[in-house]
Amino acid sequence: MKLLVLNGPNINMLGIREPAVYGTATYADLCTLIRDHADKLGVEVEIYQSNHEGDLVDKIQAAYGNTDGIVINPAAYTHTSVALLDALKAVGIPTVEVHISDVSKREEFRQISFVRAYCRATIAGHGFAGYTEAMDLLAAEAKA
Ligand code: DQA
């Protein structure tokens, strides 16, 4: 089984950006957590981060036919991107949406998520653990 973990803009700044919201652990720490969890689950994982919407669309398209599940934190593109929603629908790969912070308790403009319409589940406000929970959901679905 192969999972793709996608992160959108500014997630590479974890540890530096708004620590009161996102914590002090870094993007490298997040990648280590994801890789360790993939080992525990016995699945292959690819991790990708981009600050550019089109790069994320390209990565989703490239997953077609070779990836069993996608974990996506589209970051700010959550609230703006029909292109990411369309790309996920195009490839038809089971996907779980993750947010480190609890977006439901934040600004009005963060209340909309375009990708949510396609995703199996949304995990928000669980910090980095949201990523491993999403991986568990996708691994369980693939085994079912
Ligand atoms: C985020 C929440 C988004 O609203 C924000 O733009 C991000 C990160 C989160 O993980 O909590 O960049 O997706």
Image: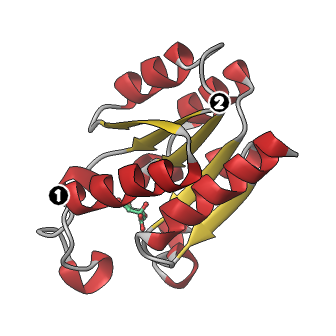
Question: How far across and how far down the image is residue 74, in percent?
Answer: 46, 47
Question: What is the residue that sits farthest to the right in this orientation?
Answer: 144
Mark 1 or 2, nearer chain start:
1
Question: For numbered disc 1, what is the local secondary structure?
Answer: helix
Relative to 68, is 105 above or below? below
Q: Residue at x 44, y 46 (%)?
A: 77
Relative to 28, is 143 above or below? above
Which mark is on residue 88? 2
Relative to 9, is 125 above or below? below
Q: Residue at x 66, y 62 (%)?
A: 122
Question: How far across and how far down the image is residue 73, in percent?
Answer: 47, 52
In this view of the protein, can residue 87 be seen by the observer? yes
Amino acid found under the numbered disc labelled 1: Met
**Foreground residue, 59 or 53?**
59
Q: Residue at x 35, y 61 (%)?
A: 33
Which mark is on residue 135? none
Alpha-carbon span between mark 1 and mark 2: 25 Å
Q: Quadrant of residue 83?
A: top right
Dot 1 crowding, Cα within 10 Å, few <14, some 14–19, many 20+:
some
- List the residue tagged with mark 1: 13
In this view of the protein, can residue 114 be seen by the observer? no
Relative to 92, is 3 above or below? below
The quadrant where ligand 1 appears is bottom left
